[in-house]
Image: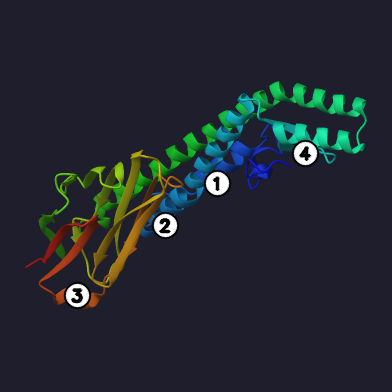
Amino acid sequence: MTKEVSTSRFPALLKLLALTGALAAVTGGVSGAFASDAEDLRTVQQKLEECREKTLKLARADVNFASGLLAKAKRGALVLLRTPDGDFYPVGVEEAEFWINLRLRAGTLTPKQAVEYLREIGKAKAATVQSLTAILKDEEDILKRAEQECAKLAAERDRLLKAGGDGGGSFVLASTKVTNPNAPELKIDATGGTATWDHCCSGGGWKVEYTFKVPRTLSPGQSFPVTLGLKAGNVRPVQPLNFSMGASAPDFNQALTISYPDSAQAEKTFTVPISAGYKDFKDIVIVIGIVSAQVVYTYNRKP
């Protein structure tokens, strides 16, 4: 069998070419993760993280995998052949032809059998493109629905934050300070919760977009959410690179990292605990770290 494509996802994508029931199974699972109004903020945050880290990531991987197989099939480099147990398996055309010629020279295949095998491969090319096109469309539909459901969860989280999960704290955001030694390549909008690192040219060039969200108020003794996101692109030349950003608060220090090109984007909402022991402090600080820059949010205790 061919070595030019991974086989780890074949049971999910190729075993059922019609993908009967696959779409309903995946989207049903996502819909079931959507929280009702009665559920608390922490539950919504957990379900949103699961949607993004599991469902959405898997859907994107499926689309990328199916797209790669289809590209090979369109070049005539890959076909799906039926195995004796009725499943379909991808075979590299060059390797298959090499294997047939090798068997023919070794005398384990007759010329008639070799011709039949080659004819079978030729017939399979068009059918493979058709089948993989259908698979890719279904996987793209699954991805679209997963994105929609994750967006619903994000909207529900924001609604809960606005409704009261973020409004009754005993510490109020009083000031924001940006320290940016990476300017002008790195531009930070602390109020909008965004930053862009447009780097050139030491070590190559790249553009990384960052997003971050912190609460308006804090209540010692209750956890609060901090959301980080980053997306890399325009990497010149294409090369493996790690990008990260971090968040720190009392008793909390976490980072979000992507490894380009394997993962070009990520977003995660962290549940940050804060001890009730901080209730008598004058202020509490949350720091967002981006490259060598910092965005410092200071919360003052209500009088």
- The CA distance from mark 2 to mark 4 is 37 Å
Give the labeled residue for mark 1. 29
The residue where tag 3 is placed is 278
Task: Please state if 294 lies on the left or on the right of 46 as rendered.
Answer: left
SS at badge 2: helix
Disc 4 designates what residue? Answer: 87
Distance between mark 1 and mark 4 Cα atoms: 26 Å
- Single out the mark in the foreground, 4 or 3: 4
Q: Position of residue 93 (x, y in %)?
A: 71, 31
Give amino acid for label 3.
Tyr
- Front residue of 279/250: it is 250
Label 2 Cα neighbours within 10 Å, binned few <14 / some 14-19 / many ≥20: some
Residue lying farthest to the front in this orientation: 105
Q: Is residue 119 visible?
A: yes
Q: Tell me which label, 3 or 2, sits earlier in the chain.
A: 2
Identify residue type, mark 1: Gly
Residue 26's x, y, as percent?
A: 57, 42
- In the image, which disc is placed on residue 46? 2
Residue 293 to residue 200: above or below? below
Mark 1 vs mark 4: in front? 4
Residues 283 and 167: in front is: 283
Distance CA(mark 2)–CA(mark 1): 15 Å
Left or right relative to 66: residue 98: right
* Residue 57 on image: x %, y %: 48, 46
